[in-house]
Image (cartoon, helix red, strand yellow):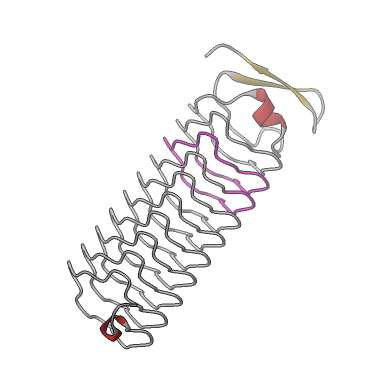
Amino acid sequence: MESSTKDWSGKDLVGKNFDGQDLSEYDFSKADLSEASLQGADCSRAAFYRTRMREAQASKARFREADLEEANLSDSVFQEADFTSANLEGADLRRADLARADLSLTNMTGVYMNDARLEKACLREADLKAADLRQADLSGADLTGADLSYSNLEGIRLTGANLKDADFTGAHLKNAHLNQADLSGADFSECDITGADFTGALHLDCSQIESALFEKGSTRFPHYIQLQWTTAENYECRCITE
């Protein structure tokens, strides 16, 4: 830390206005930034470990390489914010608005993001292992190469999302919406897709289906995936030309 003036750890900063300020490498660990405004602020490499930042306004703020481990960011607005390579492990982003935000290469292991908005967000190669994204909206998001293994994705909206090479191993995708999504190379091994809707999804093949878990008649597949059930639990899959 270059100067003691950058140490705001543990401070009461409720409702403070930091719009457009250079907060790079500041230490806000365990501070209370609830209802604060950081719109357009540069928070690159700043420390927000266990910071309370509920209902904050931080659209277009930059959090590149920042440490937000176990921070409470619930109900905050981060539209078009840049979190590239940030650490969000165990953070609380429930009901947060991250539409069009850049979360590529982030560590989001165990993050809580149920009911969050991430429409058209970029999560390329993000680590979302064991995350909670129930009912989150990631319509049109880019999750190329993202790791969502063992995550709870029940009811998630991935309509039109790019899921190329995404890892869903052991995840729960019950009642998920994957309409029009690009599924080329996605891994659904031991993934529960019961009730999921793959209508109009692209580049899905039988090998991906056969390694997933679902019940007869429960899941909607693209027209080019045809299943013939031989028993209540066994089926033969045929992929016809799209």
Split into 4 quadrants, where in the image is the N terminus? bottom left
Q: Is 61 situated left or right of 45 in this image?
A: left
Name the residue nearer the viewer: 206 or 9.
9
- Look at the picture and state if 198 lies above or below 35: above
The spot of residue 238 in percent (x, y) is 67, 17
The spot of residue 228 in percent (x, y) is 72, 20
Name the residue nearer the viewer: 14 or 50.
50
Q: Is 239 situated left or right of 143 in this image?
A: right
Whether residue 97 is in magenta: the answer is no
The spot of residue 143 in percent (x, y) is 46, 42
Instruction: Kindly identify the residue that appears in the image at 24 percent across and 80 percent down.
Output: 15
Magenta region: which residues? 148-177
Q: What count of labels does the image hold? A: 0
- Look at the picture and state if 44 lies above or below 146: below
Instruction: Kindly identify the residue that appears in the image at 43 percent across and 38 percent down.
Output: 161
Q: Is 205 situated left or right of 126 in this image?
A: right
